[in-house]
Amino acid sequence: MFTPVASALSEKNFRKSYIKMPLSVCNRVMEDKLLIWKFKRGSREALRRIYDKYHGGLLKLAVVLTGNMDKAEDIVQEVFIHFAQSANRFGLYGSLKSYLITSTLNCVRNQRRNNQRHRLQSLDKAEHVPSLARRPDQWAVLSEHLECLSRAMACLPYEQREVITLRMEANMTFRQIAGLQKTSISTIQGRYRYGIEKLRSLLNSEVTV
Amino acid sequence: MKSAEDIRRYFQKSTLSTNRERHEAIFEKIQSAQDQSKTRTPASCRLNLRSSIMKSRITKLAAAAVIIIAVALSINMWDKSIPSAYAIEQTIEANNSVRYLHIKNFTAGKDEPREGWLEFDENGQVAKVRAHMPEWASPEEGPRVIVWKDDITQVWLKRKNVLGIMKDKMAKGQITAFLQNYDPRLAVQHIYELKSQGKVEVEIDEPSDETEPIKMAVTYLPGSSTPEKRKVLFIDRTTKLVNTIELYQLKNDEYEYEGVVKLYDYNQPIDAQMFDLRDEVPSDVKLFDQAADDVGLAQGQLSDQEIAVEVVRQFFEALIAEDYARAGKLFILTIPTSEIQKQFGRVKILSVVSIGPAIPNPELETKGFAVPCTIELEENGQRKTVKLEGIKVQHLHNQPERWAISSMD
């Protein structure tokens, strides 16, 4: 279902981002350790807390990466179902947040690979726009900003989209992203720069921050 | 919109809210998945070892084979559905035959290890210990050699050229607690107990390659005394004895390598001379021997104040009798007879005019008293009375029943 990149991401690269950890992050990490510990012992409450704590961030990540609300819901649901089944295998040492982000990212990649759909589009022609429409039974309701952002991101090449999302949402360094995308830091910086320029142009045409 | 910071702010403003009913319905599915997984494989059969311990090529290859399966589940794991043939009890059993052991503890960033030799009695209790502590372990004291046996501790401060000998009945407990980290016998037993209490998670990897040691990763859980520690024990396939213990500490969400304990020379007899420093130290070493039975004065039925006064009284009576050996034994650090004679022999102490009462000495953390006294002495043919207020008395180190003079200002 997922790719080997998950382990490399969740273990090594994400940890480095915690080296200079502010107190709030430190508390979050410690709370996560306790939650994982309880979760590994079959606690429903711990799973519930993890779900409530991270579903929003993962949905946002998936929406921005896929530009498609239905796919995003499926992906996040799949990530949590897989996580719920992994109590016996999940290590105590990893970062829970990093693990979930990585799982989501891999799921998005796998789905893209399966669909074989990867086209650079302009904002007006974005294929995902109809999928952001609201349905009564939809899990998430996006703010206007997120809808705009998602539409704009859908116009970027996927690699640029991923770099910008990991940088902005997961606070990853260029080095970490380079490790994830298996390319040089300069390439990542280039993708980031071009992606930001295009995103700025697309968003300026939509709304002024 | 002008900069990447603006884009970042845009990301922050981009939010979503969730439909409560849908949210609950999805969670039910997730919880159902959790319930189903509980009926599969128990966690105790699983192994999860960090890549940091996967050093050898063979281990990596073996791990790779497992990862191919694990990839389908997308996490960094080592899933062993087949229960391990090895059990901690085998090492505990093997440890019962150990009588001698040589240990080196290498600390990350330090060149020189702490080194120790252990001898166990027939009941498996630690009977003798010799430890070499490098300078970095105690910069003020310098390098030390410590020997412990029969409740007596010898400490040789090499830089200060001092040999201290102390009787310490509590030392055994302290040594045992200390050795829980370094003596594989105690370490494994301790891990076994913590595991039964649910305070550690133990994961065992028994590689298919018979030349590879068994690896036991021990993660200390919240609720244990050291919840941020991890140890990885490498166990000999044949003897089931521990060869190496790697130590890790959780820092910034990452287990950081702290050092390694290497175990050598299982059951290689250690020369008895190794456990006695008196013939090993230089001949000019300053000897402070508190272990001898006649050091200080037994308290008996006297109160603390009374024994403090009695010590001072007997000290001056010994000087009056010119029994300098006896006087030297009434000091907390035994002073050689020649030194006492040199200090006090030039005056003739005639009598104790008055003594006491003892006053609690606020300078001492432990119980101690200042004992004022007035003595009559003869010096250069002149008789005079001298008032002394700076004689301090306290009990011996870890021997509360024996008291001696600690200083004389």
Image (cartoon, rainbow, N blue to C red):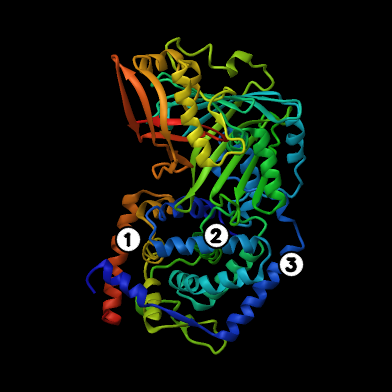
Residue at 57% from the left image edge and 22% from the top image edge: B292
Name the chain letter of the residue that bears numbered label 1. Answer: A
- Residue B36 circle label: 3
The amino acid at mark 1 is Tyr
Viewer-closest of B172 and B48:
B172
Q: Is residue B17 above or below residue B353?
A: below
Measure the alpha-carbon separation of dots 3 and 2. Answer: 23 Å
Measure the alpha-carbon separation of dots 1 and 3. Answer: 42 Å
Do discs 3 and 2 belong to a common subunit? Answer: no
Residue B109 appears anywhere in the view:
no
For mark 3, give the secondary structure. Answer: helix
The amino acid at mark 3 is Gln
Q: Residue A91 at what x, y percent from top left?
A: 59, 54
Contact between marks 1 and 3 (CB within 8 A): the answer is no
Taking the view exactly as shown, the residue that stands out farthest to the left is B2
* Disc 1: which residue: A192
> Which is more foreground, mark 3 or mark 2?
2
Name the chain letter of the residue that bears numbered label 2. Answer: A
Measure the alpha-carbon separation of dots 1 and 2. Answer: 33 Å
Badge 2 density bin: few <14, some 14–19, many ≥20, Cα 10 Å: many
The amino acid at mark 2 is Lys
For mark 2, give the secondary structure. Answer: helix
Do discs 1 and 2 belong to a common subunit? Answer: yes
Looking at the rendered image, the quarter that the N terminus of chain B falls into is bottom left
Residue at 29% from the left image edge and 69% from the top image edge: A198
